[in-house]
Amino acid sequence: MTAQKAVGQWLRLVVADAELSPYLIGVDLDRLGAHLAASLAAALDGQPIPDPWRGIGLSEAQHRRIVDYLAGVLWALGLSDDRVARARRAFAGEVGE
């Protein structure tokens, strides 16, 4: 599994979500994807990351749904529960392992 592959699947889910897709109008998805892939790789290595989804006006519930999409993609790609949890915590803005 590469971070880029996971992010590609993740972004497709977010873009297909009728409630979330309006937040991506005018966003350079290639640039966002590259940033998300770098952030995901860092998160999976246990490094803290600034949440790239913050600041675009999402509600807490919408933000949680985006993080849930990521967890689902990573789980489907066969990552261990520990790595999925690590990524989920990093993108949810939680601290700790």
Image: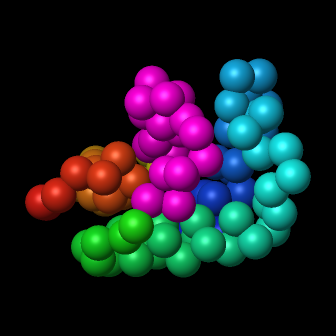
- 59 and 89: which one is in front? 59
Query: Residue 46, located in which quarter of the rendered image?
Result: bottom left
Asked if residue 45 can be seen in this view, the reply is yes
> Is residue 1 toward the left or the right of residue 86 in the image?
right
Q: Is residue 15 above or below residue 51?
A: above
Segment colored magenta:
51-73
- 11 and 57: which one is in front? 57
Q: Residue at x 79, y 33 (%)?
A: 22
- Queried whether the magenta region covers residue 59, the answer comes back as yes
- x then y, percent, for residue 11: 70, 49
- x then y, percent, for residue 75: 45, 44
Q: Residue at x 37, y 70 (%)?
A: 49
Q: Tell me the quadrant of the picture where the N terminus can be found.
A: bottom right
Asked if residue 72 can be seen in this view, the reply is no
- x then y, percent, for residue 20: 69, 31
Q: Is residue 67 above or below residue 6?
A: above
Query: Residue 13, located in which quarter of the rendered image?
Result: top right
State the predominant SS element of the stretch in magenta. Answer: helix
Q: Is residue 69 above or below residue 81?
A: above
Residue that sits furthest to the right in the current view: 26
- 5 and 95: which one is in front? 95
- x then y, percent, for residue 38: 54, 77
